[in-house]
Image (cartoon, rainbow, N blue to C red):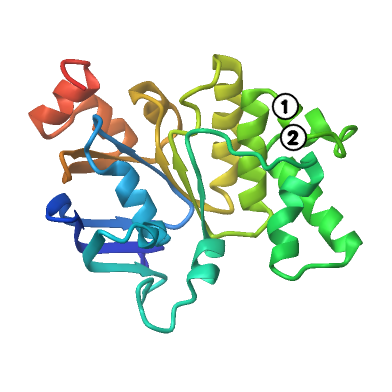
Amino acid sequence: MGQPKIAIINLNFYFRDKRVIKDFNLDINANEILSVLGPANSGITTLLRSLNRLNDLIYYARMEGEILLDGKSVYSGDQSVTELRRRVGMVFDVPTPLPMSIFDNVAYGLRLGGKKKAGGVAEAVERALVTAALWDDVKDRLKVSAMTLSGGQQQRLCIARVLALKPEVILLDRPCSGLDPISTAKIEESLTQLKETFTIVLAPHNVQQASRVSDRVAFMLMGDLIEVEANAGFFSNPKDKRTNDYITGRFG
């Protein structure tokens, strides 16, 4: 096994004096889907947000430890936060389309980054929509407002918006939490295709989703990493009783 795509080393994270992530160590491999499971208040969203420094926006938050992307600290002095967030994109639980057309939603980040040629932008938008499994739904109405899309389509649009920037890692924080089963299935199908190109860190909607799409699964509880294991072993033979209790529905 070579160098991990992301290495999290002795991570402790605080909101004021409250430690919400505790002595956390985890390697995330390239081109895998890693699901991070746990009950509410386990620190999962904070963990995801720390990987591309979104927690920097919270003035009372602080971090100890290291997070390495391809062996380089994401918190190093010469690290451009804008470039980091292009390389490590995030999709949130509630779809957040911009109040503009479907096309302009996907093109927004490209134009912000300086891509101006119409042909190049159009090609990138189409590629992102195809990769997010949304192109067939919207190819004939790209100029229509994104607000007219269904919830599942809006979430795939948000994934396409991230994909257009050609990230290396995609962080997904419960992207199917408000979606119907058909929309959820389409996003899960997209994820299995996306991992061929991207590294995916997923806070899944539920235990069943983790079992369907993950290569490996990590279980967090109150800021502690309890265990991490390949999918089959995690669900068939968890090492820790707390993990077994969670995945069998005894708590959480």
User: What residue is pinned by disc 1?
Assistant: 149
- Asked whether the beta carbons under mark 2 and mark 1 sit within 8 Å of each other, the answer is yes
**Of 204 and 77, which appears nearest the observer?**
77
In the rendered image, the quadrant that contains the C terminus is: top left
Q: With 192 as the anchor, is 117 left or right in this view?
A: right
Tell me the number on the disc at residue 146: 2
Q: At x 80% / y 41%, what residue is drawn? A: 101
Image coordinates for residue 167, horizontal then vertical, percent: 58, 59
Q: Tell me if residue 97 comes above or below residue 50 in the rendering.
A: above
Q: With 70 as the anchor, is 124 left or right in this view?
A: right
Q: Tell me if residue 193 comes above or below residue 164 in the rendering.
A: above
Q: With 97 as the anchor, is 61 left or right in this view?
A: left
Quarter where residue 30 is shown: bottom left
Q: At x 78% / y 36%, what residue is drawn? A: 135
Give the amino acid at mark 2: Ala
**Of 171 and 2, which appears nearest the observer?**
171
Estimate how packed mark 1 is, as few (under 14), some (14 to 19) or many (20 or more) residues with alpha carbons within 10 Å. some
Image coordinates for residue 94, horizontal then vertical, percent: 51, 33
Q: At x 45% / y 32%, what residue is drawn? A: 213
Give the amino acid at mark 1: Leu
- Among all residues in the image, which is located at the extreme front? 59
Q: Secondary structure at mark 2?
A: helix
Image coordinates for residue 55, horizontal then vertical, percent: 36, 57
Estimate how packed mark 2 is, as few (under 14), some (14 to 19) or many (20 or more) residues with alpha carbons within 10 Å. many
Image coordinates for residue 118, horizontal then vertical, percent: 90, 61
